[in-house]
Amino acid sequence: MELCVFSKHLQQLSFSELGRALRGIGVTGVDLTVRPQGHIEPEAVRDRLPEAAEALRAEGVTIRMLTTAVTDANAPHARAVFETAARLGIRYLKLGYFPYRGLGTLRAALADAKARLKDLAALAAERGVFAGCHNHSGPNIGANLVHLRELIEDLDPRHIGIYLDPAHAFVEGMYRGWLQALDDVADRVRMLAVKDMAIRPGDDFPAVPMGQGVVRWAEVIPALKTIAPQLGPVSIHAEVGLPLAETLRLAADETAYFRRLWES
């Protein structure tokens, strides 16, 4: 298990500045965004990702995973993202999202996602990396974790699986649906997103600091410990829309919070 911090809300920092900032809060890993409007634009990945890895390494920080928007192995720059990550020893990549367009469209959307994921699993195997499917709540295939099991059931678990997000799982199954879903997919989980979310009237499930939302961490952590040996990167998100300095403080707090929970 490798702790890292999601770079989405730190993108105003250069790679060297990002490395120094993370070291300053005691974190030596980063989950780097390589997607449109990310830290690195996909079309620049062959040049910019090696530059990022070198600059971060000089500050004592390792790229533990990439957050991408890739949903099609044949899309522009998809192969470049996978190949460059593999060449740099970055084994884990988060995939993008497959849309759910409403009642009556589910089966067709699942079939489309399954075909695309088969090709993405083949690309990941070819390059020796791992592609993670994120269970993002809302109008996305995979909001229901059990659907992800259906999509990847027959694919090589060494190269494709689940990027588990307990907060999104709680939004979609707050009572015990999250636990039943995790029970069904646990053997395919390899990556973990750490954040908390609230349910408030009129809000679209805003992210909140860990321990202030719907996630019952006292129940989640013991469940995760049962699959601890298979977990790779654990990405601390700290994504509540704060200014840079406060985002870094929150990332430090949430990293410490997670560590305390895990060790208790």
Image (cartoon, rainbow, N blue to C red):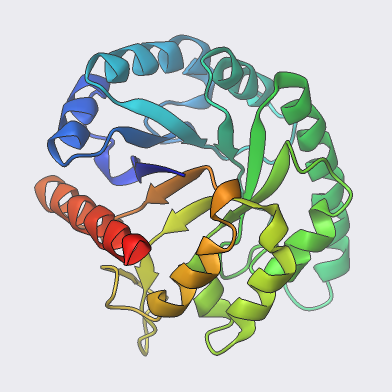
Looking at the image, is 122 positioned above or below residue 97? above
In which quadrant is the C terminus drawn? bottom left
Left or right: 6 as drawn, with respect to 147: left
Residue 128 position, x and y percent, is: 70, 23
Left or right: 223 as drawn, with respect to 148: left
Left or right: 85 as drawn, with respect to 256: right
Q: Residue at x 74, y 60 (%)?
A: 148
Which one is nearer the viewer's eye here, 264 or 22? 264
Number of numbered markers: 0
Which one is nearer the viewer's eye here, 234 or 240? 234
Q: Residue at x 81, y 42 (%)?
A: 116
Q: Residue furthest front?
A: 264
Residue 147 position, x and y percent, is: 77, 66
Q: Quadrant of residue 111?
A: bottom right
Q: Quadrant of residue 188?
A: bottom right
Q: Residue at x 69, y 41 (%)?
A: 71
Residue 248 position, x and y percent, is: 17, 47
Q: Residue at x 85, y 54 (%)?
A: 153
Looking at the image, is 8 positioned above or below residue 110? above
Which one is nearer the viewer's eye here, 27 or 205? 27
Residue 215 seen: no
Residue 138 seen: yes
